Image (tube, grey):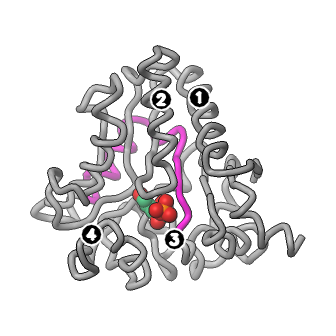
Amino acid sequence: MRLIEVENYQEMSEKVCQLMINRITDLTKPVLGLATGSTPERLYQLLVEVNQKDVVSFQDVTTFNLDEYIGLEATDPNSYRYYMNDKLFNHIDIPDEQTHIPNGRADDSEQECARYEALIQQVGGIDIQLLGLGLNGHIGFNEPGTSFKQKTHVVELEESTRKANARFFESIDDVPTHAITMGINTIMQSKEIMLMVSGEKKAGALDRLLNGEVTEEFPASILNEHDHVTIVADKAALLTSSKTK
Ligand code: F6R
């Protein structure tokens, strides 16, 4: 694993933006795996800026998001489809049909998982998967205890994850209880993974990822077994890890 330490959130976002521009430019038909949440928000603003300045084009880019809540319409401001359209897709030159997010309103969620997984295979897999880190070590919505062998699947969200995400909803009761997520196996098949970690509250999780054992009880720990992972983390997130080194 390559660890890049940066000063702060802004620098983390700039660094990942630069890495992504390089890859998008190098590949003929780049396939990106994307995440939602607070961590990549600034990155997406920067990608919009560079696209609008013609530094990079997304016309040949295909994207697959990690996850989506079950039960929310694409027009619901809390759905991940809404988030991605609002923060990135609506402002860049990517054709709509090249952006993929699991359909949280599908009649049959299991079938939707299989369709999504097959679609990823059809385009030849993900070139660069962007990840954020959950406080409990989740990646995508793969909660502690999820088998490393899982492909795209339906999950019941942990109370702690629903609480962490409740800030976006009117109340915790409005946070969906289930989601569709790429599985750990899907994520691990990506050719390259970029993990963004920022802020003191992530320090414990990052420390466990860097210094702890590989266990299904801490899903992100599997990244230690991937050949091409870059972690871009700021000083605050690395506080605990540097103390133990
Ligand atoms: C988002 C996702 C999650 C987040 C994680 C960190 O699509 O799959 O795993 O990356 O919960 O969230 P933030 O960035 O809000 O701290």
Q: Earlier in the sequence, mark 1 or mark 3?
A: 1
Badge number at residue 169: 4
* For residue 199, side relative to residue 241 (left or right): left
Magenta stretch? 113-134
Label 3 CB, ligand 1: below 8 Å? yes
Q: Nearer the viewer, residue 211 or 225?
A: 211
The residue indicated by pointer 3 is 138
Residue 125 magenta: yes
Residues at badges 1 and 3 in contact (C-beta under 8 Å)? no
Q: Where is the C terminus found, in terms of image quarters?
A: bottom right
- Asked if the residue at tag 1 contacts the one at tag 4, i.e. Cβ–Cβ closer than 8 Å, the answer is no
Query: Residue 90: percent from the left, percent from the top?
Result: 28, 33
Residue placed furthest toward the bottom = 159
Give amino acid for label 2.
Answer: Pro
State the CA–CA distance, disc 2 to disc 1: 8 Å
Instruction: Examine the rendered structure and indicate whether residue 158 appears above or below residue 238.
Output: below
Q: Earlier in the sequence, mark 2 or mark 3?
A: 2
Mark 4 or mark 2: whose residue is earlier in sequence:
2
Disc 1 residue lies near ligand 1 with CB under 8 A: no
- Which residue, given by chain and number where applicable, does mark 1 sit on? 23
Q: Earlier in the sequence, mark 4 or mark 1?
A: 1
| Mark 2 → mark 3, Cα distance in angstroms | 26 Å
Q: Label 1 amino acid? A: Arg
Q: Earlier in the sequence, mark 2 or mark 1?
A: 1
Q: Using the rendered view, name the quadrant where residue 211 is placed.
A: bottom right
Q: Nearer the viewer, mark 4 or mark 3?
A: 4
Mark 2 touches mark 1? (CB < 8 Å): yes
Marks 1 and 3 sit apart, C-alpha to C-alpha, by 26 Å
Q: CA distance from mark 4 to mark 2?
A: 33 Å
Q: Which mark is residue 30?
A: 2
Residue at the spot 27% in from the left edge and 69% down from the top edge: 169
